[in-house]
Amino acid sequence: MELAGAKEPADWEAEARRLFDLPAAEVTSFTDTIGGIARFAFHSGGRLLAAIFVAREPVAVMRDYLATRPGEAASGVLLRRTPTDVPDPGPTVCSCFNVGVNTIARAIEEQGLADVDDVGAALRAGTNCGSCRPEIKALLAALRHKQAAE
C-alpha cells in the first residue's frame, strides 16, 4: 500500500492495523522518529500478511518484490531492498502474470528464447491480454543488438 497525505496519524501501527483490518496480527517494526521513518510488517505464523513503509519523502523499496511477498515467509521484508539471495524481477512488463523485465531478459539469455511466443511459453508473459507483447519484442531486439555488438 502506498499513501500520500498532509497529516500524519498519531500512531502509525494503529493506523496500519485499521487500514489492513489486522487488529490481532503479529507485527515487526522499525521506527526512526528523527528521520520520520516507520516500517511495519504484519504476519501470522511467519507468513507476511501486509507491510507499510512510512516516510516524509518517497520511500525507496523494491515494490515488485514486496508485491509478491504476502502469504510468503516474512523475514527480511523490512529491509528496503530485495534480499541478495532473491533475483530482482525488475519493473513489471507483464501485469497479467507479474513478470518483470529482468526475469524476461534472464530467460532470453539463459534459455536462448528467440521470439515473443518463446517468452510466453517459458514465462507466460504476453499470453493473456497481449498488451506487453510489443515491449517483449523490443527487449528481444535490444538483447540481440547487444549480443551482436559484443
Image (tube, rainbow, N blue to C red):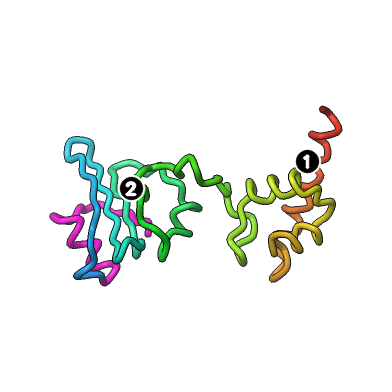
Q: Residues within 10 Å of mark 2 (few under 14, many from 20)?
A: many
Q: Which span of residues is magenta-colored?
A: 1-21
On whether residue 18 falls in the magenta region, the answer is yes
Distance from the alpha carbon under mark 2 to that under mark 1: 35 Å
* Horizontal side of residue 150 vs 124, given as left or right: right
Q: Residues within 10 Å of mark 1 (few under 14, many from 20)?
A: few
Give SS at disc 2.
loop
Query: Which residue is the site of mark 1?
Result: 142
- What is the x, y in percent for residue 12? 20, 55
Is residue 59 placed above or below 43 in the rendered structure? above
Quarter of the image where one finds residue 59 = top left
Residues at discs 2 and 1 in contact (Cβ within 8 Å):
no
- What is the x, y in percent for residue 121? 76, 63
Quadrant the C terminus occupies: top right
Direction top: furthest residue: 150
Query: Which residue is the site of mark 2?
Result: 78
* Horizontal side of residue 93 vs 39, given as left or right: right
- What is the x, y in percent for residue 30? 23, 45
User: Residue visible at 28% across and 43% down?
Assistant: 56
User: Residue visible at 35% across and 51% down?
Assistant: 75
On whether residue 109 falls in the magenta region, the answer is no
Three-letter residue code for mark 1: Ala
